[in-house]
Amino acid sequence: MTNSLFSRFTPKEPDFFPLLNEMSDVLLVASDLMVECVQHQDHASAIEFYNKIKKQEKRGDELSNSVFDKLNSTFLTPFDREDIHILADKLDDVTDRINSCAKRIVLYNPKQIPATAVDLAKLIKEGAVYINKAVTNLESLKNNSKNVQEYCSALHDIENKADDVYEQFIINLFNEEKDGIEVIKLKEIMYELEKATDAAHQVGKIIKTIIVKYA
Amino acid sequence: MTNSLFSRFTPKEPDFFPLLNEMSDVLLVASDLMVECVQHQDHASAIEFYNKIKKQEKRGDELSNSVFDKLNSTFLTPFDREDIHILADKLDDVTDRINSCAKRIVLYNPKQIPATAVDLAKLIKEGAVYINKAVTNLESLKNNSKNVQEYCSALHDIENKADDVYEQFIINLFNEEKDGIEVIKLKEIMYELEKATDAAHQVGKIIKTIIVKYA
Amino acid sequence: MTNSLFSRFTPKEPDFFPLLNEMSDVLLVASDLMVECVQHQDHASAIEFYNKIKKQEKRGDELSNSVFDKLNSTFLTPFDREDIHILADKLDDVTDRINSCAKRIVLYNPKQIPATAVDLAKLIKEGAVYINKAVTNLESLKNNSKNVQEYCSALHDIENKADDVYEQFIINLFNEEKDGIEVIKLKEIMYELEKATDAAHQVGKIIKTIIVKYA
C-alpha cells in the first residue's frame, strides 16, 4: 500500500491530478456536444457544434502538452513517468476521436445523420462519465480501487455495445444505401464514433494497469 | 551468453513461455480458419468461420492480458519487461487482423471473395508457422539463435510477397470493378489480409531485437 | 548544461548523428521527388517517380534499422535510448508516408492529380527542409536550441496549413466529384499527403522533447 505511485508523488508532485482531471472534464464537455451535434440534421448546426468541439480538442491538446512538459522536467522513475504519459495520451485520444467525427460530419455533409449515430454518441457520453469518475478517484486510489476497477469494466461493456451498434449499422448500410459516396461518408463518420468508445476502453485498460501496480 | 534475458528469468519466471507459446498456437489456429474461410463463397460459411476465428481472438486477448498482468506484478528490469510486453502485443495484433478481416467478410458480404484472398490467407498461414517455430525456440534462444533469425527473415519475405499480391489485386480491382460499393468492400477485406502479414513481420522484427540483446 | 544527452554520448557514441543526418537527407530527397511526381499527370511519370521514391524509402528503412541495431548493442541509459529510437522512428514515418502516397498514385491511377496535391507536396518539402536543419543542429543543441525550437514550431504551422488545404479539398471533392471510385482514389492520395505533414510535425514534437531534457 505504501509504494503507491500516487501516494509517492503526491507530496512533491501535486500538479498531475488537476491536469488529468481537467483533461477528463474536457472530454466530458466534448462528448456532451457530440450528443447534441448528431441530433441536428442541418449543416449550420453541425458547423456550430464542430467549432465548439474543436475548442475542447485544442484545450485537451494544451493540457496533454502540459502533462508531457511537466513529466520531462520532473524527476520520476521511468514507470511512473510512462504510466502518466500513456494515461494523458489515451485521454487525449478520446477527445481527438470526437473531434475527428465532428470534423467529418462538417466536411462530408452527408444527406442524413443516421439515428444510430445518436446511440453511439450517447455511449461515448456514458464512457466519458465513467472516465471522469475514475480519473477523479486516482488521487485516492488506495481507498477506491474497487470502484475504479468497476468504472473500467463499464468502459469495456460500453465498447462492446458500441461494437454491436456499429456492426448492425454497417450491415444495414450495405443492404440499403446504394449511393457509393453516401456509403463512404456514413461509414467513416460512424467508424470514428465507434473508435471513440474504443479509445475510452483504452483509458480503462491503462487505469487498470495503474491499479495493479500501485493500489 | 550468460546475460541472456531468457536464461536469466527462466528460473524465477517460468510462466511467460507457455503463455507466449499458447498465443502463437492461437494465431496458428486462426490462420488455418482464415484459409478455409476465404475458400467458401457463401455467407453462412463466412459467419461460421468468423465465429470460430472470433473465439481465437478472444482467447488471444485473454492470453495477452495474462502476460501484461504477470509483467505488472513481477519484478523485471525495464528492458526485459518492455520486450515481453511488445512481443505479446505484436502476436496479438496478427490474430486481431485475421479477426478484423473475417468480420469484414461477414459484415460487408461482398458478391465474391477474390481468388487472391486465398493467396494472401496462405501467406498469413505460412507466417504463423514461422512465428510458432520462432516463439517455441525463444526459451532455448542461445542454442537456436541462427534458426530463429531465419524464421524472422522468412516473415520479411512473406510480407514482401503479400505486398506484391495486394498491389496487383488493387490495380486489377480499379481496372475491372466499376461498382464503387464493391470496390470499398473488397479493398478493405484485402487490405486487412495484407496487414496481417505486415503484423507477422513486426513480430519477426521484435524477435530479432530480442536476439541482438540476449542471444 | 553538462548533462546534455548529446554532449554526453558524443565522445563515446559518435555514430548516431551521421545516421540521423542521413535519414533527414533521405527525407529531403523523397520530398523533392514528391513535388515533381504530383506535377506530372501521366502514369509513366508516376511510376518513374514512385520507383525513385521507393529507393529512398528503402534507404530510410536501412538507416533506421542501423540506428535500432546500434541502440540495442550500445550501452545507453533508457531515456537516451528511447529518445533516439523515437526520433529515428518518426523520421522514417515521414518518408514512409511520402512513399505510400506515391504508391497509391501508381496503383490507383486517378483520372487527374488535383492541383492542391502540389500545394500539399510543397508543404511536405518545406517541412523536410526544417527537419533537416533541426537534425543537423542536434549535435550542437546547447548552442542552437533556440533555432531548433523555431524549426519545430514551423513544422507545427506547416501541419496546420496542410490541414486547411486538405479540408478545403475534401469539401470540394464531395461537392464536385460524382464518381464514387474517383472519390475513393483522390481522398486517399490526398490523405496520405496530409499525413506526411502530420508525421513531420511529430518529428518536431519529439525534437522539442529532446530540447527540454538536454539543451
Image (cartoon, coloured by chain):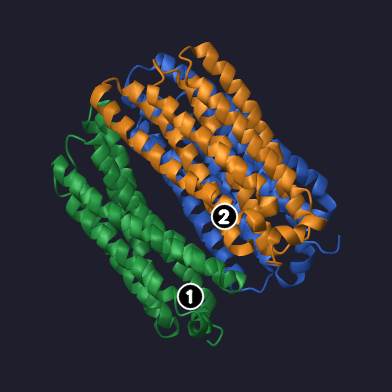
Chain colours: A green, B blue, C orange
Residue located at (36% from left, 50% from top)? A195
**Residue B28 in view:** no
In screen coordinates, is C139 left or right of C116? right
Residue B95 visible within the image? yes
Numbered badge on residue C146: 2
Q: In the image as oriented, which residue stretches furthest toward the bottom?
A: A2
Number of numbered labels in the structure image: 2
Badge 1 density bin: few <14, some 14–19, many ≥20, Cα 10 Å: many
Q: CA distance from mark 1 to mark 2?
A: 41 Å
Please give left or right for residue B111 compared with residue C60 in the image.
left
Q: Quadrant of residue A44?
A: top left
**Above or below B60: residue B118:** above
* Amino acid type of the residue that numbered disc 1 sits on in the rendered structure: Ile
> Is residue A49 depicted above or below A86 in this figure?
above
Residue C170 versus residue C151: which sits nearer the camera?
C151
Q: What is the three-letter code of the residue carrying label 2?
A: Lys
Residue visible at 25% across and 22% down in the picture: C176
Q: Which dot, 1 or 2, sits closer to the camera? A: 2
User: Do labels 1 and 2 touch, CB within 8 Å?
Assistant: no
Dot 2 falls on a residue whose secondary structure is helix
The image position of residue B149, as x and y in percent, is 77, 44
Q: Is residue C4 left or right of residue A62?
A: right
Q: Residue at x 64, y 62 (%)?
A: C214
* Percent coordinates x, y for residue A38 in the rendering: 19, 48
Mark 2, Cα crowd under 10 Å, few <14 / some 14-19 / many 20+, is: few
Q: Position of residue B130 (x, y in %)?
A: 68, 42
Chain letter of the residue carrying label 1: A
Residue drawn at (62%, 22%), measured in percent from left and top?
A: C52
Instruction: Give the answer, above or below, for where C162 lies relative to A22.
Output: above
Secondary structure, mark 1, is: helix
* Percent position of residue A202, x then y: 43, 60
Residue marked by disc 1: A211
